[in-house]
């Protein structure tokens, strides 16, 4: 709640004007800070989240168990499911959220560092168990970080410039990540990938992401004229049903996003399916990861252009269409060249979906309720992200990879259809700062 409770008062209008003026005054500085933070942070985290290095590492440590691969990704998503609403409760009453971001971001990066150390100092099953535990903890911090840093972006970057920012930031991150992925696959993993090689990959990811977090030191965060009252966690949870009833367009959107996120169940199995027709050497993994990341890199400029011209809703729908087509093509691909082409499509599509679904969440409803809306959408998506890889691992082990891909396509189509038919473009709605 605000200490200026009447939205029609001159005092509130003047406070809003000062807030907007501060955003404009610091826009260039904050734009650069967000750009550098995202570029370096995403470069490092892509080594953890790319559907190449981590699934192949888990497959190696588990002696070829698809279930363990799915379990690892499910534990990460489960961690992300637990904490978004808690993250929202940490920041929604604060006029400055960046200090909280440094703590949570530091914790997330520490888990990547410990993944590297586990590979250097542990052996056998101990390494696998440590990696699974750390993936769960990584997800816990990631769930909170998603709320904090998305809300921070909404405070310092106007909606009309977010598409361009995400496009340029992801373009630069993808370019760096693609080159580092190729170098990592060629020189750190080599012909016979081993535990030490993967550990060096994670250590490199930690260094890059830590440098990205430090870039936010230069950011100047404005203090909004209104914030919510500090509520207990249970009290905040009790308000969620009323929030969803008051904004049916957002409710339909987050349900659609949840369904489409179930399509992520296929992500860790793309590379394993490709491995049936080729050897997954370090060079091969490097080439495919390079293709995956460079396609996301180039496509970010396109997604950003579409988002600024047509809205993130259009980018969301087009990314789902490309994802479906790429998955269908994968089932007919054979050999390295065809697989690279498929991963180009999947990289562009998954990146477009990730950015569009995240940024679209920021455009519904009021500013004061934005942290909890981000938390609701992220929690629902990560419930799907938990169930998806785990069920995908079971389905792959029993019925094969093709069954996983067909089910993934079905979820993507359902999520796209709901938004197409029942969720209007939120930018056409009247802004509501309260």
Image (cartoon, rainbow, N blue to C red):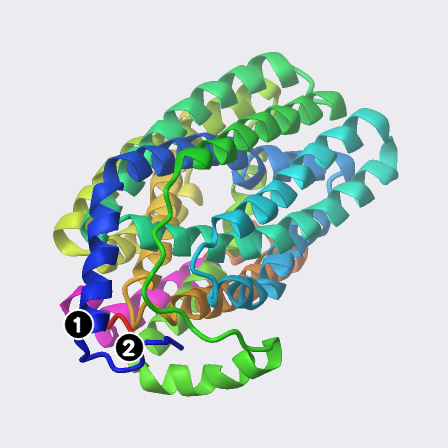
251 sits to left or right of 83: left
Badge 1 element: loop
CB contact under 8 Å: marks 1 and 2 = yes
Q: Position of residue 291 (x, y in %)?
A: 41, 28
Quarter that holds the N terminus = bottom left
Query: Dot 2 lies on which element?
Result: helix
Tell me which corner region of the image, top left, top right, bottom left or bottom right, holds residue 366: bottom left
In primary-sequence order, the first of circles 1 and 2 is 2
Mark 2 highlights which residue? Answer: 249
Q: Give the crowd class for mark 1: few <14, some 14-19, many >=20 residues within 10 Å.
A: few
Q: Is residue 73 above or below residue 256?
A: above
Q: Can you say whether 371 is above or below 324 in the image?
A: below
- Viewer-closest of 164 and 292: 164
Furthest-top residue in this view: 187
Q: Which residues are magenta?
A: 407-431
Is the stretch drawn in magenta largely helix, strand or loop?
helix
Quarter containing the C terminus:
bottom left
Left-right relation of 45 to 136: left
The structure residue drawn at horizontal position 47% and vertical position 27%, both measured from the top left corner, is 288
Within the image, what quadrant is residue 387 found in?
bottom right
Q: In the visual, does 135 lie left or right of 17?
A: right
Q: Could you say where residue 113 lies in the image, as x and y percent from the top left?
A: 69, 33
- Could you tell me residue 194's position as x and y percent? 73, 23
> Where is 229 relative to 302, above or below?
below
Query: What is the spatial separation of the Cα atoms under label 1 and label 2, in whole angstroms?
Result: 10 Å
Closer to the camera, 215 or 49?
215
Foreground tag (1 vs 2): 1
For the residue pair 46 and 319, the one nearer the viewer reads as 46
């Amino acid at each position: 709640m605000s200490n200026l409770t009447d939205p029609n008062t001159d005092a509130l209008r003047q406070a809003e004007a000062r807030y907007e003026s501060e955003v404009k005054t610091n826009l260039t500085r904050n734009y650069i800070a967000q750009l550098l933070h995202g570029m370096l942070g995403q470069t490092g985290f892509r080594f953890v989240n790319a559907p190449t290095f981590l699934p192949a590492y888990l497959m190696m440590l588990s002696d070829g168990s698809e279930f363990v691969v799915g379990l690892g990704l499910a534990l990460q998503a489960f961690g992300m499911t637990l904490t978004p609403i808690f993250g929202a409760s940490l920041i929604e009453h604060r006029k400055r959220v960046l200090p909280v971001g440094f703590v949570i971001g530091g914790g997330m990066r520490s888990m990547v560092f410990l993944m590297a150390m586990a590979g250097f100092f542990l052996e056998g099953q101990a390494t696998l168990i440590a990696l699974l535990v750390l993936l769960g903890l990584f997800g816990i911090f990631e769930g909170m970080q998603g709320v904090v840093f998305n809300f921070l972006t909404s405070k310092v970057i106007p909606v009309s410039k977010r598409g361009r920012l995400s496009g340029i930031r992801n373009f630069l991150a993808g370019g760096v990540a693609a080159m580092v992925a190729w170098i990592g696959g060629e020189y750190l993993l080599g012909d016979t990938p081993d535990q030490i090689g993967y550990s060096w990959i994670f250590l490199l990811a930690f260094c890059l992401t830590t440098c990205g977090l430090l870039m936010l030191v230069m950011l100047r965060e404005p203090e909004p004229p209104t914030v919510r009252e500090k509520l207990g966690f249970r009290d905040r949870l009790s308000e969620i049903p009323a929030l969803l009833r008051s904004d049916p367009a957002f409710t339909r959107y987050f349900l659609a996003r949840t369904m489409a996120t179930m399509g992520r169940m296929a992500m860790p199995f793309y590379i394993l399916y490709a491995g049936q027709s080729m050897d997954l050497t370090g060079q091969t993994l490097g080439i495919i990861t390079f293709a995956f990341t460079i396609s996301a890199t180039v496509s970010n400029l396109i997604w950003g252009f579409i988002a600024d011209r047509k809205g993130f809703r259009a980018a969301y729908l087009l990314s789902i269409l490309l994802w479906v087509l790429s998955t269908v093509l994968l089932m007919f691909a054979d050999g390295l060249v065809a697989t690279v082409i498929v991963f180009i499509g999947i990289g562009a599509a998954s990146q477009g979906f990730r950015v569009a679904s995240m940024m679209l969440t920021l455009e519904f409803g009021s500013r004061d309720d934005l942290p909890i809306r981000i938390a609701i959408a992220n929690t629902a998506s990560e419930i799907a992200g938990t169930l998806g890889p785990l069920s995908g691992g079971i389905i792959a082990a029993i019925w094969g990879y093709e069954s996983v891909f067909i089910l993934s396509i079905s979820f993507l189509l359902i999520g796209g259809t709901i938004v197409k038919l029942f969720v209007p473009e939120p930018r056409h709605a009247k802004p509501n700062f309260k």
